[in-house]
Image: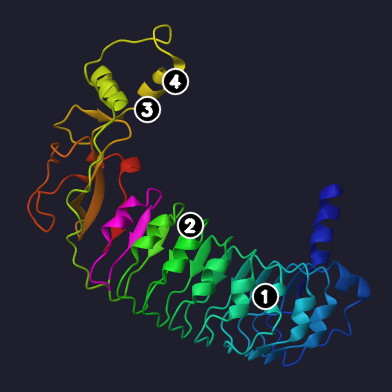
């Protein structure tokens, strides 16, 4: 009985006016109770040219989908939706002049303006301090405003398919950014400041005009995917990165682990036992070494699916430790088997 009542309550919270070929929006048939209870409102796939003022009657609305209409403007009354968290307005005719002045006062967490006619990111959007996901792909953007740094809660920024030529360093001031999509633009360089994006997991830069990458890009320790295909990139990254000599603690730990010196919790303080358990084996099969905090990041190209030559990042125990494949990153000679490097110690760069 409770599950049925819950399902009925969920339906009461959703108002679906999608795919009705509506030119105007009439709410005469919507009761006051339904207006009060509605939390999700679907108006997508209609023929609306503007968002009507009557939208403001849904005081508890949290989700609004007005995608795939012919919208050229969003009315001021949308700012009355003080609980609105998600606004989807894809594939309309909106531009930077289509938003109300106080649009930035909304408590939005997700905003999608992809497939519109924006030439600039409206400054109202940079005032949405709760925003976690911003998508303005497939528009006519030529630049990213420096005010983008105000979106300090942003986790995903999608600006693919525009005319952007540069990435402002201010993007690096987004502490929670995990996904940055800038593919299919006209970007010529990547600012080294992006290394401050410590939580960045995916960086999509394919189909741009990049000719090089800053070596600092490899210090993004959480980066799992870097997409670069379709760039005139000089694919000779960095063979050996700067090496920080190991500390005395690490040297002692390496000696204990590499020589299999026995130890027990009874003989060592618990913090040292914990430290020794963190040892990582060098991925070079010809090396029996280990490392803790100090390692060398090393780019090697390998065959992938018999079609692509992908640079994979290895973590070696020292500069003297040579990986078994060719030292020439552009060589088509003997390739290292991808499986010989543990998956948790390599970061893939997608070139194909």
Question: Residue reaching furthest top?
Answer: 266
Q: Which residues are magenta?
A: 210-229
Q: Residue 351: image x %, image y %?
A: 26, 63
Viewer can see residue 265: yes
- Residue that badge 3 annotates: 278
Cα distance in 3D space between marks 3 and 1: 47 Å
The local secondary structure at tag 1 comes to helix
Cα distance in 3D space between marks 2 and 3: 26 Å
Residue at image point 26% right, 57% down: 215
Q: Quadrant of residue 77?
A: bottom right
Discs 3/1, front: 1
Q: Nearer the viewer, residue 218 or 327?
A: 218
The local secondary structure at tag 4 comes to helix
- Residue that badge 2 annotates: 178
For residue 138, side relative to residue 341 (left or right):
right
Seen in the picture, residue 331 relative to 90 is either above or below; the reply is: above
Q: How is the image coloured?
A: rainbow
Seen in the picture, residue 179 relative to 339 is either above or below; the reply is: below
Q: Residue 37: image x %, image y %?
A: 86, 67
Pointer 2 with pointer 3, Cβ within 8 A: no
């Amino acid at each position: 009985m409770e599950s049925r009542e819950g399902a009925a309550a969920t339906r009461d919270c959703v108002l679906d006016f999608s795919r009705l070929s509506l030119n105007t929006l009439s709410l005469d048939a919507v009761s006051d109770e339904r207006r009060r209870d509605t939390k999700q409102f679907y108006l997508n796939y209609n023929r609306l040219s503007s968002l009507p003022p009557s939208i403001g009657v849904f005081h508890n609305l949290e989700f609004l989908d007005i995608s795939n209409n012919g919208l050229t403007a969003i009315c001021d009354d949308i700012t009355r939706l003080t609980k609105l968290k998600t606004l989807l307005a894809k594939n309309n005719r909106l531009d930077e002049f289509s938003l109300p002045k106080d649009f930035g006062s909304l408590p939005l967490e997700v905003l999608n303006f992809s497939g519109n006619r924006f030439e600039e990111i409206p400054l109202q959007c940079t005032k949405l301090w709760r925003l976690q996901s911003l998508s303005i792909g497939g528009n006519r953007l030529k630049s990213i405003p420096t005010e983008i740094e105000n979106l300090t809660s942003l986790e995903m920024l999608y600006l693919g398919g525009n005319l952007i030529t540069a990435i402002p360093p201010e993007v690096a001031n987004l502490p929670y950014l995990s996904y940055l999509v800038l593919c299919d633009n006209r970007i010529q360089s990547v600012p080294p400041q992006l290394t401050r994006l410590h939580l960045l997991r995916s960086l999509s830069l394919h189909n741009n005009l990049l000719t090089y990458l800053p070596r600092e890009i490899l210090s993004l320790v959480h980066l799992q995917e870097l997409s670069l295909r379709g760039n005139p990139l000089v694919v000779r990254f960095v063979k050996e990165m700067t090496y920080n000599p190991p500390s005395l603690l690490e040297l002692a730990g390496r000696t204990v682990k590499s020589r299999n010196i026995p130890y027990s919790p009874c003989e060592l303080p618990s913090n040292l036992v914990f430290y020794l358990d963190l040892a990582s084996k060098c991925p070079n099969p010809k090396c029996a070494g280990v490392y803790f905090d100090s390692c060398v990041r090393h780019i090697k190209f390998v065959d992938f699916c018999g079609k692509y030559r992908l640079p994979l990042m290895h973590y070696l125990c020292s500069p003297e430790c040579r990986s078994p494949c060719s030292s020439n990153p552009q060589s088509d000679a003997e390739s290292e088997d991808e499986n010989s490097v543990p998956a948790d110690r390599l970061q893939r760069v997608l070139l194909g």
